[in-house]
Image: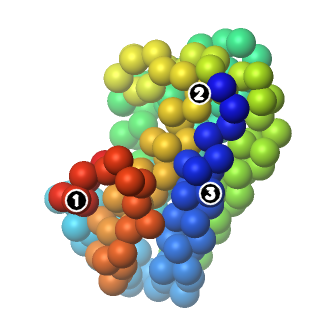
Amino acid sequence: MTAPAGAIAGCRRAHRALLGTIDGLTDEQARSASKLAGWTIGHVLTHIARNADSVVRRLEGAAQGRVVGQYPGGYGGRAAAIEVGAERPAAELVADVRSSAAELEAAIERFPATAWDGLTRDVSGAELPAHTTVLSRWREVEVHHVDLGLGIHRLTGHPSWSRSGSP
């Protein structure tokens, strides 16, 4: 398989839109409730950043012919990382989202063209081809961008996503 060019472009657009929304985020906003029950905006942003790290992790594994889990420690490790990062100052949250998105985009650029069919493992344990991680990331950013509740209402959407707003 060749690189999933459409998903890569959509992922980049989603990153830019998200970064535009959170530019200038205040500490007060970061501590406020998101649209996800029990999560603040800080939780959502930390999740978005750790999700980017998880895609980098999976791509690096696939590039080396290894199947690695999405998050160190599975669901528990994911939840712990989100809790640890959620209370950081807004500037730190934004910098984390920015740097993790940039690292993900760099990982995609350096990913070997011959490895897109290599296997990765998502947090549920399902083994999927590496090319699916990019579409999954795009969807994750779009959905959680809305979950922030900071005024975004337009998705850059993939044609196969349902009109309900859920990918």
**Residue that carries the numbered disc 1 in the rendered image:** 163
Q: Which mark is residue 130?
A: 2
Q: Residue at x 56, y 48 (%)?
A: 7
Q: Which mark is residue 9?
A: 3
Disc 3: CA contacts within 10 A as few (<14), some (14-19) or many (>=20): some
- Mark toward the start of the polypeptide (2 vs 1): 2
Q: Picture coordinates of residue 61 (x, y %)?
A: 68, 22
Q: CA distance from mark 2 to mark 3?
A: 16 Å
**Of 89 and 98, the residue lying toward us:** 98
**Of 94 and 58, the residue lying toward us:** 58
Q: Amino acid at mark 3?
A: Ala
Q: Picture coordinates of residue 79 (x, y %)?
A: 36, 40
Question: CB of mark 3 within 8 Å of CB of mark 1?
Answer: no
- Say if 147 sits above or below 21 in the image: above
Q: Is residue 44 visible?
A: no
Residue 148 picture quarter: bottom left
Q: Considering the numbered disc 1 on the image, is that residue within a helix, a strand or a loop?
A: loop
Q: Residue at x 38, y 54 (%)?
A: 159
- Mark toward the start of the polypeptide (3 vs 1): 3
**Of 28 and 129, the residue lying toward us:** 129
Q: Amino acid at mark 2?
A: Ala
Q: Picture coordinates of residue 6 (x, y %)?
A: 58, 50
